[in-house]
Amino acid sequence: MLRRLTMGVGLLLLLALAALASMIRIVPGTPAAPTAAPAQPAAQSVVAGAPAPAGNWSHPLLTIPVQGVQRSQIVDTWGQSRANGARVHQATDIMAPGGTPVIAAAPGTVEKLFYSEGGGGVTLYVRSPDRQWSYYYAHLQRYAPGVVEGMQVRAGDLLGFVGDTGNAGTGNYHLHFGVSHMAPVDSWWKGQPVNPYPLLAGRR
């Protein structure tokens, strides 16, 4: 009798413990926060087609654009005062008799034939094949026969003839030759003027 009672009490205790265990809920601990990934550097913004900053470019020597003129004869006229100080000269003036042939200084496409009454007079713009350079020929007497916009030229091809048109001054025959660094999307009148003298004379 006592043995049965003892077994009964033990069984009740086991059942009570089992019921108590079923009521206990195990709550998992809070997981550690993930380590933050290192910040990535911001991507540099690049403007498509923007010209390189001044000095951050290179260009081969140019053909002298006035027939018969030697490199040693080229004078650096960049930065000279013009119109009694009203403007600064941003080109190289190459003196030569009127009618002297003007030839292409570099290959490219004749982009614009333009007459500027109070400026360059009879002018011509050639755009380089990569569209990053524009070569400007001004104060021409006239264009060479057959020169039209859109035509391809090679260095040394005849473009026109030295004159005194525009604001050159009557009898002041010379070629006003300019070079501009361009963005490929720039129109013919835009760009960053660059001193042509080192590219013509072969020295700075």
Image (tube, rainbow, N blue to C red):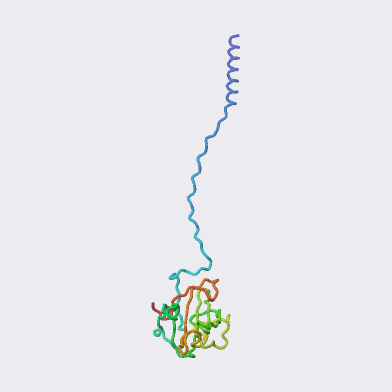
In this view, the residue in front, 159 or 176, is: 176
Q: Is residue 33 above or below residue 144?
A: above
Residue 60 percent coordinates (x, y): 45, 77
The front one of 94 and 9 is 94
Q: Residue 109: x and y, percent?
A: 55, 79
Is 158 displayed left or right of 95 in the figure?
Answer: right
Q: Residue at x 58, y 13 (%)?
A: 6
Determine the residue located farthest toward the top in the rendered image: 1
Image coords of residue 131 (percent x, y): 53, 74
Residue at (47%, 75%) from the top-left corner? 193
Instruction: Give the tally of numbered discs.
Output: 0
The quadrant of the picture occupied by the C terminus is bottom left
Q: Nearer the viewer, residue 189 or 50?
A: 189
Q: Where 24 falls versus 170 (above or below)?
A: above
**Which quarter of the rendered picture does the N terminus lie within?**
top right
> Which residue is at 57% across, 21% downward?
17
| Residue drawn 48% across the image and 55% down it | 41
